Image: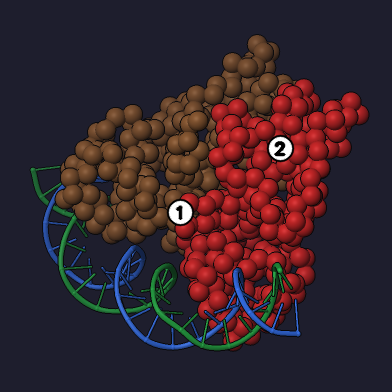
Chain colours: A red, B brown, C green, D blue
Amino acid sequence: MNKTSETKGITQCSIFDFDLSWYELLTDEEKLLIDEHSVSINFKKGETVCKRGAFASHIFFLEEGLVKVYLEERNKNLILTLFTKNNLLGLSSVFEGNNKLPYSVSTYTDSRVRMIDIQVFRQLLQQNPDFSYRIINLLNEKTSQIYGRFFSLTQKQLHGRLADILLCLSNRIFKSKSFELPLSRADLGDLTGMSTESVIRMMKEFKDDGLIDMHCKSIELLDVARLERISEFG
Amino acid sequence: MNKTSETKGITQCSIFDFDLSWYELLTDEEKLLIDEHSVSINFKKGETVCKRGAFASHIFFLEEGLVKVYLEERNKNLILTLFTKNNLLGLSSVFEGNNKLPYSVSTYTDSRVRMIDIQVFRQLLQQNPDFSYRIINLLNEKTSQIYGRFFSLTQKQLHGRLADILLCLSNRIFKSKSFELPLSRADLGDLTGMSTESVIRMMKEFKDDGLIDMHCKSIELLDVARLERISEFG
DNA sequence: AAAAATAACTGCTTCGCGTCAGTTTTTTCC
DNA sequence: GGAAAAAACTGACGCGAAGCAGTTATTTTT
């Protein structure tokens, strides 16, 4: 009996990084249809891909780069998720009820985004069951991850939330214990629901405790086991 | 130009209450298949329908009642959503990667749940594009609502969160300004990410300010406009 | 209908964490 | 390469909200 996997803590991660490919499930005709009804656009670092409230006319496929999906209101920002390359964005617009984008997207690094006509995408969903089944799986995987993050942000305090996000960045995005952070401290704040100042203080504390090493943007996780314990116990 | 709808605040609601019916999209044969591979089970108030970590063998269709979908860990509880009758629960288990339930479900009122074999449900998704398209829309609608709630719980303070949930209960569940609350104060806390004591204090404050009337479980919203302003400004 | 258990409520205390008001460092850009 | 802008950092302060400990009310049990 694999007891641990049933009782272990609620994992949180803000990054979608599954390799459930969908393109290969299309027929040649369907692929052609996508190609004819999509364009690939380059964005520079820091550019806005789309804004909340705009009409949703495309599904975005991130061919290259790293982007954030976020909500902004007054001075309050919340980063919902990060996306790495080879992921589909904007799927929630498939629902005809949502003809406006429910969030904004902007880039952290130079990125290439293929913009797929939403009507074509809908048509493919309705005609190709394998494709649509795969999309359902993507959405479900996404939902599970959101729940974990929801728990982290509402139930844990700063130590736990920061540990969560550091582990997540290391495991899911950079796949290395040391990395150059493309996000600012303020972004880490928007991602963890803490103020910029608290991010800075907390990271210094982690550094003093020997959990991480850090010079400005370059970060290295030194004691993953302890970070995981901090993540688990909030 | 409808400016307001583009710029208005991020709505939050924890309740799924869309009437996107799915059963009617099935063929007679498919309906029969569902009927043959499902059972309807009665639950009394307060009973547990399923627990996080258990194997996901069924999709749940709530035929009657009111339930909560929640995470629990140590002494920390978080209610992810409430479901009213005629809604599908457990869709995230459709994804083969999630063979364990990612959350627990229990009832607030006497409820009737139809438990549909997950393999049959998957099969129908793969063979009936209209059905599967409808399910995608359901999932997307759900995701949008979660984002709103995510914002509420992480960016607003107690006043705003409590106003959110009261408005939501009134609009979405009871469809009336006065109602008998089946949830305890502790549940309201788990729903809004606040302590039970704070829920009590805050509700008294709302009562003293003439926003609501309240005797124990029976609640009446007196000044919806002001509650909405409180909700918006956090 | 009385006893036991659970939920609702209250006041007090504590502290986590955000805000403010700065200084220093790093990055951007002409 | 130097000026300007942005980001990183620091310390002091104060408030929002949780925790605790106890009382009252309500519901469940037998």
Q: Nearer the viewer, residue B144 or B136?
A: B144
Give the number of the disc on residue A74: 1
Q: Which residue is drawn at 54% across and 24% down?
A: B20
Tell me: residue B200, above or below residue B220: below
Residue A202, image x, y percentages: 54, 77
Q: Nearer the viewer, residue A88 or A167?
A: A88
Q: Mark 1 belongs to which subunit?
A: A
User: Circle 2: is it few (<14), some (14-19), or many (20+) Cα within 10 Å?
Assistant: many
Query: Do residues under tags 1 and 2 come within 8 Å of each other at their CB atoms?
Result: no
Amino acid carrying label 2: it is Ile
Where residue A50 sits, quadrant-wise, is: top right
Q: Which residue is drawn at 91% across and 29% down?
A: A28
User: Circle 1: is it few (<14), some (14-19), or many (20+) Cα within 10 Å?
Assistant: few
- Asked whether residue B95 is in view, the answer is no
Residue B29, image x, y percentages: 68, 13
Q: Which of marks 1 and 2 is nearer the N terminus?
A: 2
Q: Is mark 1 on a helix, strand or loop?
A: loop
Left or right: residue A162 versus residue B162 is right
Task: Work out how far the residue at label 1 is from the one at label 2, CA to CA, in angstroms.
Answer: 27 Å
Q: Looking at this view, name the residue that lies furthest to the top.
A: B28
Q: Looking at this view, name the residue that lies furthest to the right.
A: A28
- Asked whether residue B127 is in view, the answer is yes
Amino acid carrying label 1: it is Arg
How many badges with numbers are in the image? 2
| Residue that badge 2 annotates | A59
